[in-house]
């Protein structure tokens, strides 16, 4: 444990707690050092978003829930950051949507795979794919360790959810004809741009909402889930997220400029 004490009344307590969680998970061998950097990038975009789930994110969450429930063999791909921040939610989501869970890492080591598997099992996972020799199949388009996948999981999946992902793998999965759900605070990343459905939100905020939405949609007809999917346009929705960030930055600029609105308008 890194042991820093975060006072409850600290204005950025929640964000600091997440950092602390990631730092602890790094020490425990779950998160890679590059995962800490990726988290920092996410934090910066979250700051611009106002650390809230936006309307476009809610629309993407609904589409993602519908996609998971209509898929034939959905898989949730888990890396170190996702395991550290949302292990319980991953397990709940997998139960609600009958999705498999597979460990997939850029910096693969058997120790790290096992540490992530343990964390997921502690959170209630009954089966965790992609660990050790189980990741015996390869995604042809990829060079990194991420190419190694489980023949029972990602290889045969029609839909893969890839929270906090890098762009290469999203592209490769799409090329293989799979649908991809991304969770990425950066709407400009290649992952966000290439995915079939992109949730521009923090995994810690959107994961519980995704579970809740999936539970509700499960009660609805399959026609309703298909209608939601057909109505969803990822590029348009991503553009809404970008505009939202622009508008927030404009508001913040006007608040910051003491000289009056006109002089700050460029
Ligand atoms: P790409 O290769 O897709 O262009 P990248 O190089 O940014 O993206 P990574 O370094 O793997 O890829 O970063 C992962 C992404 O995860 C980053 O874009 C970051 O914004 C996002 N991210 C980090 N933490 C979170 C979080 N808690 N919730 C959602 N997204 C996050």
Image (cartoon, helix red, strand yellow):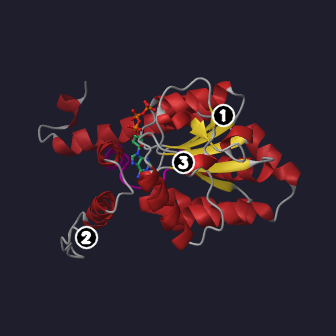
Q: Which mark is residue 1?
A: 2
Kind of element beneath mark 1: loop
- Residue 241 in view in this figure: yes
Inter-mark Cα distance, 2 to 3: 33 Å
Mark closest to the chain's N terminus, 2 or 3: 2
Seen in the picture, residue 145 relative to 72 is either above or below; the reply is: above
Q: Which mark is residue 31?
A: none
Residue drawn at (53%, 45%), measured in percent from left and top?
104
Of tags 2 and 1, the one toward the viewer is: 2
Is 193 on the left or on the right of 115, as rendered?
right
Q: Which mark is residue 57?
A: 3
Inter-mark Cα distance, 2 to 1: 43 Å
Judging by the rendered image, the residue that carries numbered circle 1 is 233
Inter-mark Cα distance, 3 to 1: 12 Å
Q: Which residue range is magenta in the image? A: 44-57
Nearest the eye: 27 or 109: 109
Give the total of numbered labels.
3
Query: Ligand 1 shows up in which quadrant of the image?
Result: top left
Seen in the picture, residue 167 relative to 78 is either above or below; the reply is: above
Q: Position of residue 154 (x, y in %)?
A: 67, 42
Of tags 2 and 3, the one toward the viewer is: 2
Kind of element beneath mark 2: loop
The crowd level at tag 1 (other Cα within 10 Å; few <14, some 14-19, many 20+) is: some
Residue 228 among magenta residues = no
Q: Position of residue 170 (x, y in %)?
A: 56, 33
Q: Mark 2 and 1 residues: CB-CB less than 8 Å, in contact?
A: no
Seen in the picture, residue 136 relative to 28 is either above or below; the reply is: above
Q: Position of residue 136 (x, y in %)?
A: 63, 40
Residue 49 among magenta residues = yes
């Amino acid at each position: 444990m890194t042991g820093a004490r975060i006072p409850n009344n600290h204005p950025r307590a929640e964000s600091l707690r997440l950092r602390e969680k990631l730092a602890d998970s790094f020490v425990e061998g779950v998160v890679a050092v590059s995962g800490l950097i990726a988290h920092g990038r996410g934090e910066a975009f979250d700051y611009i978003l106002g650390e809230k789930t936006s309307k476009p994110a809610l629309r993407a969450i609904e589409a993602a829930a519908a996609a998971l429930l209509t898929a034939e063999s959905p898989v949730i791909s888990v890396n170190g950051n996702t395991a550290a921040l949302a292990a319980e939610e991953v397990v709940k989501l997998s139960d609600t949507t009958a999705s498999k869970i597979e460990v997939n890492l850029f910096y693969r080591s058997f120790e790290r795979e096992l540490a992530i598997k343990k964390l997921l099992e502690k959170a209630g996972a009954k089966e965790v794919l992609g660990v050790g020799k189980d990741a015996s199949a390869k995604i042809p388009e990829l060079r990194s360790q991420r190419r190694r996948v489980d023949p029972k999981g990602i290889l045969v999946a029609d839909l893969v959810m890839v929270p906090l992902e890098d762009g290469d793998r999203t592209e490769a999965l799409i090329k293989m004809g799979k649908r991809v759900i991304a969770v990425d605070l950066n709407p400009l990343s290649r992952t966000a741009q290439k995915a079939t459905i992109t949730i521009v939100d923090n995994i810690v905020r959107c994961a519980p909402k995704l579970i809740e939405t999936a539970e509700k949609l499960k009660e609805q007809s399959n026609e309703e889930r298909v209608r939601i999917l057909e109505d969803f346009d990822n590029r348009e929705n991503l553009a809404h997220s970008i505009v939202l960030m622009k508008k927030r930055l404009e508001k913040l600029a006007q608040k910051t400029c003491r000289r009056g609105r006109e002089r700050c308008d460029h």
